[in-house]
Amino acid sequence: MCGIAGWIAGPGSALTELTLESMLQTIVHRGPDDQGICRFRSAGTGHEVFLGHRRLAIIDPEGAHQPMCDAASGLALTFNGEIYNFRELREELTRLGYGFVRDSDTEVLLRAYQHWECGVVNHLRGMFAFAIWDARNERLFLARDRFGEKPLFLCENGSGLYFASEIKALLRVPGVEVSVNLEAVWDYLAYRYVPGPKTLFTGIRKLMPGTTATWERGKLKEERYWMAPDRSPCGLQLPQRDTVSTFLSRLDEAVKLQMVSDVPFGAFLSGGIDSSTIVALMSRHNSKVKTFSVGFSEDSYSELDYADEVAAHFGTEHHEIVVAHRDIIDRLPQLVAYRDAPVSEPADVPIYLLACEAARSVKMVLTGEGSDELLGGYPKHLAERFAQGYQLLPGCIRHRLIEPLVHALPYGFRRTKTAVTNLGIEDSRERYVRWFGALNRSERDRLSTLRLNGTSFTDAPPFDADSRSSALRRILYFDQTSWLPDNLLERGDRMTMAASIEARVPFLDHELAAFVSSLPDRYRIRGLRSKWILREAGKQLLPERILTRPKVGFRVPINEWFRGNMRDYLLDHLQSGSSITRTYYRAPVLDKMLAEHLNGRQNHEKLLWSLLNLEIWHRQYART
């Protein structure tokens, strides 16, 4: 796991190694073990090429220095991530006549590009973002992994193309002019994160997951090489007789592959079925797994008892920490800086603190992230199947009977309220965003003074699923191409790399995803049971109490903290004269929402958390 940065710029560029060193210094947390820089000149056009690298050594820690250069082939590589099938690829490439001197996935990636060129991405099983300078073809080739586990940001101006693992590195490039992207702010108010390829900076964009970018002789071309398989209708092939065992075997293979490491590693353990299954499978291949858990002093939010039970069951070396409201206040500005964006979820803070605890004894962890988005683990995946039927009810029944009754229920029925509100949204694109989002279009119009056309949907992911697909597959595809890469995986990458450790996610192995997607929907959702196939497989691995416990989710007691110890902190950012973003909102509307939340009449924690973080980001980054 590492950080990369570099550029290709026209002849006469004033950028030097000092510029690249400055860029790399901003991401030193991504790679504290080593730094490398190399420089080339395009023979035909005279363009200057700089590649930079910060290394966190996981595989072949004593070697595989980057950028890795090979003068004989005219190739140079700077690479962030891990190629889990690198040993299989090395055997294949060896048979094809290529030689190797190290046991390194970096060297394998370099040779794989030498053989397959731009088609190399189709042979990789892993998480990655990399840049290769191909001198013979005068080509700069960049790629990002299929689900977007590893980040890569791009910036173009009249003089060149610049890239980096984190935005803060691009802000160090002289001549890169950026300002607040108000279209992205408008999107943020709906999603609670910025959907790709946008960022909150004008002129800086994300290279989308499963995408390559090729600069060749002055022209840049981006191509999508992979789509999440749930984009298309299920082939409805009859599953194998032992489908559950086959699923478990494939998941076990992904876990085993991702345990390849030359340094100590462990696992994040929440006590839920996802992370518990990962720990169970790790224990098959390692007799002493290190596990790490986080909880809260508020018992209703803490899952430490479940995590303790799993750790004891598998005999892990278990570590746990407890987070309080003061940790949020103290860490939030720092984590906004690490993310270069608002911290979308309060859970980011405890994940960072957990990563810091893990970093005391390991350099890599496996997590259960991605299971819900692959297997259908959220209540919305159950509810979405009823959207069309609900909308067929007469409007008078929905609007005058069902909705008023449901919204009169106390806060404990918040999921029921959310479901009824969202099931009535006929435009599925608006509904998908709204399930986990902050504001719908009319709510944004009422609160915000911004007037933009940022809600116009295109046919690009996450809204280009085949209309013939099932309701479940369509919403899973949205999650896999927006909520997952732009929120959860971005969170996971930044919060762990901020602590200088690597996080791996076996559930997002693309071969496992393809297998699951080939199955009929009933293997994911059956009746009112979510993640059916994982629960069936878990019967061979986990204690009964873990399999049958209700889904809690990694929730932080922000609702209570905003009304208590974080009240003044919240009001200072959203109501004081120093608030930068207050001009984005109609003050009476915002103040009413604050009052409703603080006096307990309504719960606006999602929105208020989003607005608080947007203000913190503006105080750190806004250039107006």
Image (cartoon, grey):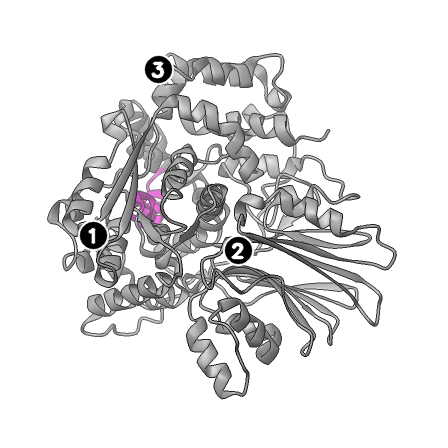
Q: Which residue sits at x=26%, y=53%?
A: 289
Q: Sequence-wise, which precedes: disc 3 or disc 2?
A: 2
What is the chief secondary structure element of the magenta stretch? helix
Asked which secondary structure carries label 1, the reply is loop
Q: Position of residue 214 (x, y in %)?
A: 67, 66
Q: Position of residue 470 (x, y in %)?
A: 36, 59
The part of the image, by quadrant, that contains residue 208 is bottom right
Q: Which residue sits at x=44%, y=39%?
A: 434
Asked which secondary structure carries label 2, the reply is loop
Say if mark 3 contacts mark 1, CB within 8 Å: no
Q: Position of residue 512 (x, y in %)?
A: 35, 65
**Does residue 294 sit above or below 158 in this rendering?**
above
**Is 388 colored magenta in this rendering?**
yes
Give the magenta-colored segment's residue range. Answer: 378-394
Q: Nearer the viewer, mark 1 or mark 2?
A: 2
- Crowding at mark 2 (Cα within 10 Å: few <14, some 14-19, many 20+): some
Judge by depth and name the residue closer to the eye, 347 or 526.
347
For disc 1, the marked residue is: 527
- Crowding at mark 3 (Cα within 10 Å: few <14, some 14-19, many 20+): some
**Is 380 colored magenta in this rendering?**
yes
Q: Sequence-wise, which precedes: disc 3 or disc 1?
A: 1
Q: Which residue sits at x=40%, y=43%?
A: 359
Callout 3, which amino acid? Gly
Badge number at residue 461: 2
Real-space Cα distance between discs 3 and 1?
35 Å
Asked which secondary structure carries label 3, the reply is loop
For disc 3, the marked residue is: 600
Callout 1, which amino acid? Gly
Q: For this view, does 19 lie left or right of residue 525?
A: right
Real-space Cα distance between discs 1 and 2?
29 Å
